[in-house]
Amino acid sequence: MPAPQSTETSTEPASRPLRADAQRNYDKIVLAAREVFRERGAEGSLDEIARRAGVGPGTLYRHFPTRDALIDTVMRDWSDRINADSEEIALSDLPARAALATWFSKFVENVGIYQGAAAKVMSAMDDPSSPIYRKCQVLVAANDKVLERARESGALRPGVESREVMRLVSGVATVVDQSGIGAAEAEPMLAIVLDGILLPESRASVPSPAATRS
């Protein structure tokens, strides 16, 4: 699938606040786009996005004149969620393994922003020429934050590098994306990553993130 031609130009609503009904439509379009891109890739049908959002194509194009504008907004929403997730986990009282298990699970979920995204993110994180490079750096910084929390607690093995951990977890995300397995089925693979990066005393079994959320 071609890489989405995301730009760094702003596609946020104008500085003047939108009317309440227009803001609701905007939010519904972004949510529907996230779903369609996740299922069908960045070339997913804009008409399908409008249909799922419950708006007409004209409403979609008033908010997002181009596909690139919509992709950019979805990825900004993605960036905001990644930052919020990492901040919440880094400030939590969870033990190191539980915190990392929760973060890795969210990482896999978030990196699946659209079908085929996991492999694109993995290849773009070290490629400044990629159109999504700057968005990938948000993920890099978020992962650093959570790993540093574990490091400060003394739970990480010496020499564990955040980028290498990112590549491992991105690899799991790619398997999830390409094989179509559910997020819960990724947890045994993520547990192997945890066992490899944590010191033995930090490896006590913890409930899976899915069980914790239920």
Image (cartoon, rainbow, N blue to C red):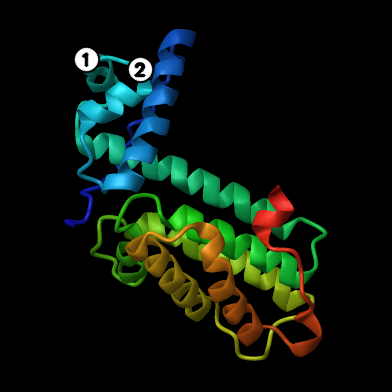
Corner quadrant of residue 175: bottom left
Q: Nearer the viewer, mark 1 or mark 2?
A: 2
Relative image position of residue 39 (x, y in whole percent): 33, 46
User: Does residue 99 sit above or below 17 in this rendering?
Assistant: below
> What amino acid type is highlighted by mark number 2?
Gly
Relative image position of residue 91 (x, y in whole percent): 75, 56
Corner quadrant of residue 74: top left
Q: Where does label 2 land, which residue?
A: 54
Q: Where does label 1 land, which residue?
A: 58
> What amino acid type is highlighted by mark number 1?
Gly
| Residue drawn at 61 percent across, 90 percent down | 159
> Is residue 121 among what the camera can see?
no
User: Does residue 71 sit above or below 128 in this rendering?
Assistant: above
User: Does residue 143 sit above or below 151 in this rendering?
Assistant: above
Is 125 placed left or right of 84 in the picture? Answer: left
Most extreme residue toward the left is: 2
